[in-house]
Image (tube, rainbow, N blue to C red):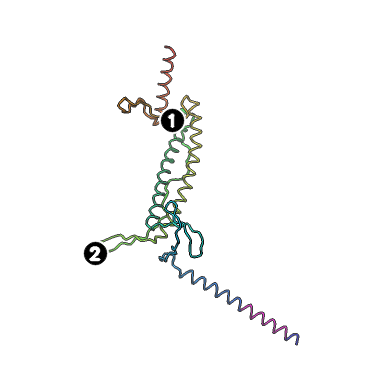
Amino acid sequence: MKALFGQTQSNRYSVYSFLNLKSVVFAMLYIFVVACTTNEHEAKELDDKLEVKDSVDGEKIGLNDDGEVIIQSETSAADELRSQIWVNSKLEDEINREHHELKRCRADLADPRLGGNGRVAEIPDVDGLKSFTEIKEKFGLDSEGNLKVLKKEYFLDRLKKERNYAHSLKGTLKIIKKHGEECTRNMASARLKHGLPGKRYESEGYFTSDGAWVGTEKAEKNLDDAFERAAKAKAKSEQNSEN
Protein backbone atom coordinates (compact mmCIF):
# COMPACT_ATOMS: atom_id res chain seq x y z
CA MET A 1 0.00 0.00 0.00
CA LYS A 2 2.81 2.40 0.90
CA ALA A 3 4.51 1.66 -2.40
CA LEU A 4 1.24 2.13 -4.24
CA PHE A 5 0.51 5.36 -2.37
CA GLY A 6 3.99 6.67 -3.03
CA GLN A 7 3.68 5.83 -6.71
CA THR A 8 0.29 7.54 -6.87
CA GLN A 9 1.67 10.61 -5.14
CA SER A 10 4.64 10.66 -7.52
CA ASN A 11 2.31 10.46 -10.51
CA ARG A 12 0.26 13.28 -9.05
CA TYR A 13 3.37 15.49 -8.78
CA SER A 14 4.28 14.62 -12.36
CA VAL A 15 0.82 15.65 -13.53
CA TYR A 16 1.07 18.92 -11.57
CA SER A 17 4.53 19.61 -13.04
CA PHE A 18 3.28 18.92 -16.53
CA LEU A 19 0.27 21.22 -16.05
CA ASN A 20 2.48 24.00 -14.64
CA LEU A 21 4.90 23.66 -17.53
CA LYS A 22 2.00 23.70 -19.95
CA SER A 23 0.64 26.87 -18.35
CA VAL A 24 4.03 28.58 -18.63
CA VAL A 25 4.34 27.60 -22.29
CA PHE A 26 0.85 28.92 -23.06
CA ALA A 27 1.58 32.16 -21.19
CA MET A 28 4.81 32.69 -23.10
CA LEU A 29 3.07 31.90 -26.36
CA TYR A 30 0.33 34.42 -25.57
CA ILE A 31 2.86 37.14 -24.79
CA PHE A 32 4.71 36.36 -28.00
CA VAL A 33 1.54 36.52 -30.08
CA VAL A 34 0.41 39.78 -28.46
CA ALA A 35 3.84 41.31 -28.94
CA CYS A 36 3.92 40.30 -32.58
CA THR A 37 0.44 41.52 -33.32
CA THR A 38 0.92 44.89 -31.60
CA ASN A 39 1.78 47.45 -34.27
CA GLU A 40 3.81 50.32 -32.82
CA HIS A 41 3.30 52.27 -36.04
CA GLU A 42 -0.47 52.27 -35.71
CA ALA A 43 -1.89 55.59 -34.54
CA LYS A 44 -3.47 55.09 -31.12
CA GLU A 45 -5.87 57.26 -29.18
CA LEU A 46 -3.97 59.33 -26.63
CA ASP A 47 -5.11 59.72 -23.05
CA ASP A 48 -4.85 63.51 -22.98
CA LYS A 49 -7.70 64.16 -20.55
CA LEU A 50 -6.57 66.61 -17.91
CA GLU A 51 -8.29 68.93 -15.48
CA VAL A 52 -6.05 71.92 -16.13
CA LYS A 53 -5.18 74.05 -13.09
CA ASP A 54 -2.35 76.18 -14.44
CA SER A 55 0.30 76.36 -17.14
CA VAL A 56 4.05 77.03 -17.33
CA ASP A 57 5.93 77.80 -20.57
CA GLY A 58 3.21 76.27 -22.69
CA GLU A 59 2.90 73.12 -20.55
CA LYS A 60 -0.35 72.32 -18.79
CA ILE A 61 -0.45 71.48 -15.09
CA GLY A 62 -3.50 69.63 -13.86
CA LEU A 63 -5.09 66.48 -12.49
CA ASN A 64 -5.71 63.24 -14.31
CA ASP A 65 -8.63 60.87 -13.64
CA ASP A 66 -6.78 59.39 -10.64
CA GLY A 67 -6.29 62.81 -9.03
CA GLU A 68 -2.55 62.81 -9.71
CA VAL A 69 -0.78 66.08 -10.56
CA ILE A 70 0.46 65.92 -14.14
CA ILE A 71 2.55 68.23 -16.32
CA GLN A 72 1.42 67.73 -19.89
CA SER A 73 2.81 69.13 -23.12
CA GLU A 74 1.50 68.54 -26.60
CA THR A 75 3.46 68.76 -29.85
CA SER A 76 2.35 67.87 -33.33
CA ALA A 77 4.13 64.92 -34.90
CA ALA A 78 5.50 67.11 -37.69
CA ASP A 79 6.85 69.70 -35.22
CA GLU A 80 8.53 66.99 -33.13
CA LEU A 81 10.38 65.57 -36.14
CA ARG A 82 11.13 69.03 -37.54
CA SER A 83 12.63 70.08 -34.20
CA GLN A 84 14.87 67.01 -34.03
CA ILE A 85 16.06 67.50 -37.62
CA TRP A 86 16.87 71.15 -36.80
CA VAL A 87 18.88 70.09 -33.72
CA ASN A 88 20.81 67.57 -35.82
CA SER A 89 21.50 70.20 -38.47
CA LYS A 90 22.92 72.59 -35.86
CA LEU A 91 25.08 69.78 -34.44
CA GLU A 92 26.41 69.00 -37.91
CA ASP A 93 27.30 72.67 -38.44
CA GLU A 94 29.10 72.82 -35.10
CA ILE A 95 30.99 69.62 -35.87
CA ASN A 96 32.11 71.03 -39.23
CA ARG A 97 33.36 74.23 -37.59
CA GLU A 98 35.18 72.44 -34.79
CA HIS A 99 36.65 69.92 -37.23
CA HIS A 100 37.92 72.72 -39.49
CA GLU A 101 39.56 74.51 -36.55
CA LEU A 102 41.13 71.27 -35.36
CA LYS A 103 42.62 70.57 -38.80
CA ARG A 104 43.95 74.13 -38.97
CA CYS A 105 45.46 73.87 -35.50
CA ARG A 106 47.17 70.56 -36.31
CA ALA A 107 48.55 72.04 -39.54
CA ASP A 108 50.03 75.03 -37.65
CA LEU A 109 51.62 72.76 -35.06
CA ALA A 110 53.24 70.73 -37.84
CA ASP A 111 54.87 73.87 -39.30
CA PRO A 112 58.67 73.92 -38.70
CA ARG A 113 58.45 77.62 -37.77
CA LEU A 114 56.59 76.49 -34.63
CA GLY A 115 58.91 73.56 -34.00
CA GLY A 116 56.94 71.00 -35.99
CA ASN A 117 58.35 68.29 -38.22
CA GLY A 118 56.23 69.16 -41.25
CA ARG A 119 53.93 66.17 -40.81
CA VAL A 120 50.35 66.81 -39.72
CA ALA A 121 49.36 64.56 -36.83
CA GLU A 122 46.39 62.29 -37.30
CA ILE A 123 43.01 63.59 -36.21
CA PRO A 124 40.02 61.59 -34.89
CA ASP A 125 38.21 59.59 -37.48
CA VAL A 126 35.12 61.72 -37.80
CA ASP A 127 34.86 61.93 -41.56
CA GLY A 128 32.13 60.28 -43.53
CA LEU A 129 29.34 60.66 -40.99
CA LYS A 130 26.16 59.25 -42.42
CA SER A 131 22.59 59.65 -41.33
CA PHE A 132 21.06 56.54 -39.83
CA THR A 133 17.89 57.17 -41.78
CA GLU A 134 17.17 54.42 -44.24
CA ILE A 135 14.39 55.19 -46.68
CA LYS A 136 12.62 52.62 -48.80
CA GLU A 137 12.45 53.71 -52.40
CA LYS A 138 10.17 52.47 -55.16
CA PHE A 139 10.41 53.40 -58.83
CA GLY A 140 7.35 53.26 -61.03
CA LEU A 141 4.34 55.02 -62.45
CA ASP A 142 2.07 57.25 -60.39
CA SER A 143 -1.70 57.52 -60.83
CA GLU A 144 -1.21 59.90 -63.77
CA GLY A 145 1.27 57.64 -65.56
CA ASN A 146 4.37 59.68 -64.70
CA LEU A 147 7.63 57.99 -63.74
CA LYS A 148 8.32 58.76 -60.09
CA VAL A 149 10.52 57.61 -57.22
CA LEU A 150 8.37 56.98 -54.16
CA LYS A 151 10.02 57.13 -50.76
CA LYS A 152 8.34 55.72 -47.68
CA GLU A 153 9.28 55.03 -44.09
CA TYR A 154 7.48 54.73 -40.80
CA PHE A 155 7.26 58.03 -38.92
CA LEU A 156 8.27 56.47 -35.60
CA ASP A 157 11.29 54.81 -37.23
CA ARG A 158 12.41 58.13 -38.68
CA LEU A 159 12.02 59.93 -35.36
CA LYS A 160 13.99 57.22 -33.51
CA LYS A 161 16.75 57.29 -36.10
CA GLU A 162 17.01 61.08 -35.95
CA ARG A 163 17.32 60.89 -32.16
CA ASN A 164 19.96 58.16 -32.41
CA TYR A 165 21.76 60.30 -34.98
CA ALA A 166 21.74 63.22 -32.52
CA HIS A 167 23.29 60.99 -29.86
CA SER A 168 26.02 59.96 -32.30
CA LEU A 169 26.67 63.57 -33.32
CA LYS A 170 27.01 64.67 -29.69
CA GLY A 171 29.58 61.93 -29.09
CA THR A 172 31.55 62.96 -32.17
CA LEU A 173 31.43 66.63 -31.17
CA LYS A 174 32.71 65.78 -27.70
CA ILE A 175 35.72 63.95 -29.16
CA ILE A 176 36.55 66.77 -31.58
CA LYS A 177 36.29 69.42 -28.86
CA LYS A 178 38.55 67.41 -26.56
CA HIS A 179 41.26 67.16 -29.21
CA GLY A 180 40.68 70.78 -30.22
CA GLU A 181 41.23 72.07 -26.69
CA GLU A 182 44.42 70.05 -26.35
CA CYS A 183 45.69 71.29 -29.71
CA THR A 184 44.88 74.91 -28.83
CA ARG A 185 46.93 74.66 -25.61
CA ASN A 186 49.89 73.13 -27.44
CA MET A 187 49.68 75.71 -30.23
CA ALA A 188 49.60 78.62 -27.76
CA SER A 189 52.74 77.31 -26.10
CA ALA A 190 54.49 76.82 -29.45
CA ARG A 191 53.54 80.29 -30.69
CA LEU A 192 54.87 81.98 -27.55
CA LYS A 193 58.18 80.12 -27.88
CA HIS A 194 58.61 81.47 -31.41
CA GLY A 195 57.73 85.12 -30.85
CA LEU A 196 54.02 85.05 -31.59
CA PRO A 197 51.06 85.78 -29.32
CA GLY A 198 49.38 82.70 -27.87
CA LYS A 199 46.17 83.40 -29.78
CA ARG A 200 45.85 84.18 -33.47
CA TYR A 201 45.87 87.84 -34.48
CA GLU A 202 42.46 89.43 -34.80
CA SER A 203 41.49 92.20 -37.18
CA GLU A 204 42.24 95.75 -36.05
CA GLY A 205 40.84 99.12 -37.02
CA TYR A 206 38.77 102.05 -35.85
CA PHE A 207 35.41 103.73 -36.36
CA THR A 208 35.23 107.13 -38.02
CA SER A 209 33.06 109.95 -36.72
CA ASP A 210 30.40 108.79 -39.17
CA GLY A 211 30.41 105.31 -37.65
CA ALA A 212 32.20 103.66 -40.57
CA TRP A 213 34.72 100.94 -39.79
CA VAL A 214 38.23 101.38 -41.19
CA GLY A 215 40.39 98.29 -41.04
CA THR A 216 44.10 98.69 -40.42
CA GLU A 217 45.04 95.04 -39.99
CA LYS A 218 43.33 91.91 -41.28
CA ALA A 219 42.72 88.89 -39.10
CA GLU A 220 45.37 86.19 -39.23
CA LYS A 221 44.54 83.54 -41.83
CA ASN A 222 47.76 81.54 -41.63
CA LEU A 223 51.21 81.55 -40.08
CA ASP A 224 52.57 83.75 -42.88
CA ASP A 225 50.18 86.47 -41.71
CA ALA A 226 51.18 85.86 -38.09
CA PHE A 227 54.93 86.22 -38.64
CA GLU A 228 54.37 89.23 -40.92
CA ARG A 229 52.37 91.05 -38.25
CA ALA A 230 54.89 90.04 -35.59
CA ALA A 231 57.71 91.50 -37.70
CA LYS A 232 55.76 94.74 -38.17
CA ALA A 233 55.08 95.01 -34.46
CA LYS A 234 58.75 94.37 -33.66
CA ALA A 235 59.93 96.97 -36.17
CA LYS A 236 57.45 99.52 -34.84
CA SER A 237 58.56 98.85 -31.28
CA GLU A 238 62.24 99.29 -32.19
CA GLN A 239 61.48 102.53 -34.03
CA ASN A 240 59.58 103.92 -31.06
CA SER A 241 62.43 103.01 -28.71
CA GLU A 242 64.93 104.84 -30.92
CA ASN A 243 62.78 107.95 -30.91
Residue on which disc 2 sits: 145
Identify the residue at the far front of this view: 53
Neighbour tally class for label 2: few under 14, some 14-19, many 20 plus, Cα within 10 Å: few
Identify the residue at the far bottom of this view: 1
Q: Quadrant of residue 80?
A: bottom left
Task: Describe the element under mark 1 as helix, strand or loop.
Answer: loop
Q: Are marks 1 and 2 in contact (CB under 8 Å)?
A: no
**Along the horizontal axis of the image, is 9 left or right of 181?**
right
Give the magenta range: 5-18
Q: Is label 1 or label 2 in front? A: 1
Decide: is 78 above or below 35. above
The amino acid at mark 1 is: Arg
- How far apart are the two marked residues, 1 and 2, measured between alpha carbons? 61 Å
In terms of sequence position, does the residue under pointer 1 or pointer 2 come before the other? 2
Q: Quadrant of residue 242?
A: top left
Viewer-side residue, 213 vs 168: 213
Decide: is 43 above or below 119. below
Examine the residues drawn in magenta and state their main secondary structure: helix
Residue on which disc 1 sits: 200
Asked if residue 201 is among those painted magenta in the image, a careful observer would answer no
Q: Position of residue 40 (x, y in %)?
A: 44, 65
